[in-house]
């Protein structure tokens, strides 16, 4: 029995796909092992969002060959689709598979026999038209369920359409089937994930369904306590979806909504499909219905043409917005994107300074959000995450909670009252609330 190990870089979508591919291997009789357990085969699922994808890929391959010198190393994922020939030149790589090939790797790399030349199987991205169902299971406390793939937007900074192809979705019927499978495994929380999940519903190039209809259908699945929506574009987050989440028993009050810039001038240059006024309206609508709702924001600093004045527009916009935390990305040039040809390149030193300013703002926002919720009662899903005798978990509105370790609480939902913020920035709970009571 050959041993196979997996390593995943990047987003929740990658995790769902790695998990599904690993189950394919197990069904074929391979033994799934940890990275450091001398595997015969390594499958490395890559990301291309930032400019250090190549460095990370090389480092992981190097570690793999150190652990198991005679192993067969396969690279899949977004970086593999974008730069297959470049990856093929990395010492120790045996095969590179693109977006259209990665779910067929067991069949395409029959027996994983090493050859003299690196095998490159990467079709043009136009060939990636099939939706491959995927969800993670047994890897973490929560499950990532893929409902959509690809993107038709073509933002000026983004390589995702080049790496994953056009927007396409599973059918609601198939997703509900997967959700029922997940419910049978005692998973408490499911995260709906995709490249552009608000665009859910395109099958074979035609719009067949809507995201809100999927949300309503999956809300009725018995056996799943919590459902979380991963990142969703502000122009696709409709009032209907916000209204439904506000009254749902399963969908949690947490949205992650990419902004990218608080300057309309930069948003237009980026090719985004909204202006800051719409974003402000989305936040206002959410908070009017769910004052305790957590709102996360993606923002890019240092995009070409972002002057000090335009950056301050973004900073002040975010500072005045009722949001809970930021994911800050320092703009990096990506090959084959329109942004690389734009004037007004921002020096890297300035990009890093702006990034630091927004990260400090994020901490301020997070702390303020946590403080607003102290003294209130929430439900925490405790994880197998123990540090210094403390276990951790997240409330439905994404507040990270710290409590005295109790093994019986792992993967359990507990009602707690939030007490105080500790020196690590997590929220301590009132211990008497932590009585075992299965939900």
Image (tube, rainbow, N blue to C red):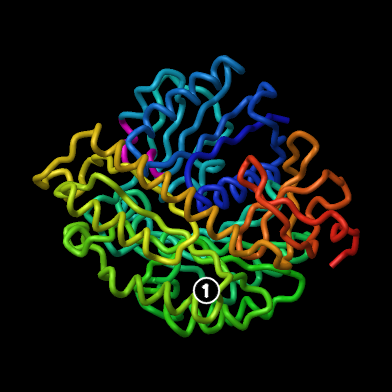
Residue sitting at 82 percent across and 45 percent down? Answer: 404
Q: Which residue is mark 1?
A: 171
Q: 352 or 132: which is nearer to us? A: 352
Q: Is there any visible trace of residue 307 in the rendered image?
A: yes
Is residue 236 covered in magenta?
A: no
Q: Quadrant of residue 111?
A: top right
Picture coordinates of residue 331, whole percent (x, y): 28, 43
Q: 57 or 204: which is nearer to us? A: 57
* Residue 25 to residue 201: above or below: above
- Main SS, magenta residues: helix
Residue sitting at 55 percent across and 36 percent down? Answer: 110
* Residue 18 to residue 62: above or below: below
For disc 1, the neighbor class at 10 Å (few under 14, some 14 to 19, many from 20) is some
Q: 212 or 424: which is nearer to us? A: 424
Is residue 82 covered in magenta?
A: yes
Magenta stretch bounds:
78-85
Q: How many marks are shown on the rendered structure? A: 1
Quarter of the rendering occupied by the C terminus: bottom right
Picture coordinates of residue 174, whole percent (x, y): 59, 71
* Residue 7 to residue 144: above or below: above
Q: Is there any visible trace of residue 122 in the rendered image?
A: no
Task: Report whether 363 appears left or right of 246.
Answer: left
Picture coordinates of residue 177, whole percent (x, y): 66, 71
Task: Report whether 326 appears left or right of 126.
Answer: right
Residue sitting at 63 percent across and 25 percent down? Answer: 40
* Residue 20 to residue 30: above or below: below
Local SS, label 1: loop
Quarter of the rendering occupied by the N terminus: top right
Q: Quadrant of residue 35?
A: top right
Picture coordinates of residue 400, whole percent (x, y): 64, 52
Residue sitting at 28 percent across and 68 percent down? Answer: 276
């Amino acid at each position: 029995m050959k041993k196979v190990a997996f390593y995943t870089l990047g987003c929740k979508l990658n995790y769902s796909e790695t998990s599904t591919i690993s189950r394919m291997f197990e069904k074929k009789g391979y033994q799934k092992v940890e990275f450091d357990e001398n595997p015969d085969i390594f499958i490395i699922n890559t990301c291309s969002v930032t400019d250090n994808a190549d460095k990370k890929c090389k480092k992981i391959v190097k570690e793999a060959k150190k652990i198991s010198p005679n192993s067969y190393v396969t690279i899949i994922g977004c970086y593999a689709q974008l730069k297959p020939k470049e990856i093929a030149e990395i010492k120790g790589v045996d095969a590179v598979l693109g977006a259209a090939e990665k779910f067929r790797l067991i069949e395409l790399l029959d027996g994983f026999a090493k050859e003299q030349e690196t095998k490159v199987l990467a079709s043009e991205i136009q060939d990636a038209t099939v939706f491959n169902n995927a969800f993670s299971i047994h890897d973490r406390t929560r499950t990532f369920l893929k409902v959509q793939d690809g993107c038709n937007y073509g933002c000026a900074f983004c390589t995702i359409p080049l790496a994953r192809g056009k927007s396409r979705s599973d059918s609601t019927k198939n997703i509900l089937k997967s959700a029922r499978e997940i419910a049978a495994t005692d998973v408490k929380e499911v995260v709906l994930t995709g490249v552009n999940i608000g665009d859910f519903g395109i099958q074979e190039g035609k719009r067949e369904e809507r995201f809100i209809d999927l949300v309503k259908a999956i809300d009725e699945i018995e056996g799943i306590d919590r459902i979380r929506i991963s990142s969703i574009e502000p122009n696709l987050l409709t009032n209907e979806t916000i209204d439904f989440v506000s009254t749902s028993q399963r969908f949690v009050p947490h949205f992650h909504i990419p902004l990218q810039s608080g300057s309309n001038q930069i948003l237009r240059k980026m090719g985004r499909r909204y202006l800051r006024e719409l974003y402000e309206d989305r936040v206002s609508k959410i908070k009017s219905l769910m004052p305790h709702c957590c709102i996360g924001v993606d923002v890019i600093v240092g995009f070409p043409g972002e002057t000090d004045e335009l950056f301050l527009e973004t900073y002040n916009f975010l500072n005045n917005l009722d949001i809970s935390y930021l994911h800050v990305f320092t703009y990096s040039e990506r090959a084959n994107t329109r942004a690389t040809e734009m004037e007004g390149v921002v020096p890297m030193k300035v990009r890093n300074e702006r990034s630091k300013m927004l990260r400090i703002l994020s901490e301020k926002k997070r702390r303020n959000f946590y403080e607003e919720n102290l003294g209130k009662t929430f439900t925490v899903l405790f994880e197998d995450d123990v540090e210094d005798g403390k276990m951790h978990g997240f409330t439905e509105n994404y507040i990270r909670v710290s409590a005295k370790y109790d093994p019986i609480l792992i993967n359990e939902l507990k009602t707690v009252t939030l007490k105080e913020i500790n020196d690590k920035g997590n929220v301590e709970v009132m211990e008497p609330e932590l009585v075992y009571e299965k939900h």
